[in-house]
Structure formats: structure tokens, C-alpha cells
Amino acid sequence: MDPDSARILWHVWQHRHARLDELAELVGETSTGNVLLRIMHDINPAAKRALGQPILVFEQSAMDYHSGEHVFHSWWLFSS
């Protein structure tokens, strides 16, 4: 996995969720589309090979039970 993909994954791991614009700023991308492509073509395929499933999933609306915050339009770590 390239360094920017690793930074994205680590950021979501630390914060439990993140919006595309937040991740784009994190890795210095000008387009959120590039971050989406990175998730779809680099991060999740690597996770599928290693873990048998994607590691990042998009949720339009979800509850962060750690903070009690209702979060909209964010990427989360997959949990079964």
C-alpha cells in the first residue's frame, strides 16, 4: 500500500470515521474523487486480499457510539 493510502487508513482507524473532503486534505489531494478512487482501487482491494473483505465502508448516516455523535456521509472501518 502506498504512503497516502496508509495515511488514510490510519486516520480512519484513529478517528473511527472520516469524510472524503477530510481525507483529501489529509493527503493533499485537490479532488475528493481521487480519494474515492484510492479507496475503491487501492485500499479496499488490498484489504480484500489480506482479510477477505473491504476495510472501509461508506455510510450515509451512522451513530458513533464512542462519542454519541450522529455522523453523516462518512467512511468507516468495516466491522462485522
Image (tube, rainbow, N blue to C red):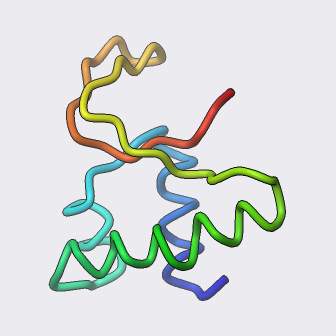
Relative to 65, 52 lies left or right: right
Q: Is residue 58 above or below residue 3?
A: above
Query: Dividing the picture into quarters, in which one does residue 20 lie?
Result: bottom left
**Quarter of the image containing the N terminus?**
bottom right
Q: Residue at x 21, y 72 (%)?
A: 32
Q: Residue at x 73, y 61 (%)?
A: 48
Choose top left, top right, bottom left or bottom right for residue 74.
top left
Between 10 and 43, which is closer to the camera in this rendering?
43
The residue lying toward the viewer, choosing from 37 and 72, is 37
Report the side of 34 relative to 31 (left or right).
Answer: right
Q: Is residue 63 left or right of residue 13?
A: left
- Total labels: the figure holds 0
Tell me which corner region of the image, top left, top right, bottom left or bottom right, holds residue 43: bottom right
Rendered-image quadrant of the C terminus? top right
Name the spot of residue 71 as percent of width and height, x first.
26, 28
Q: Which residue appears at 47% of the width and 69% of the height?
A: 40
In the rendering, at what x and y percent does residue 57 appear? 47, 45
Q: Position of residue 4 (x, y in %)?
A: 49, 82
Q: Using residue 58 as the reference point, say whether residue 6 is left or right of it.
A: right
Residue found 48% across the figure and 38% down from its top:
16
Tell me if residue 49 comes above or below residue 69 in the rendering: below
- Measured as percent of width and height from the top left, residue 29 is found at 25, 84
Q: Nearer the viewer, residue 54 or 14?
A: 54
Q: Nearer the viewer, residue 39 or 16?
A: 39
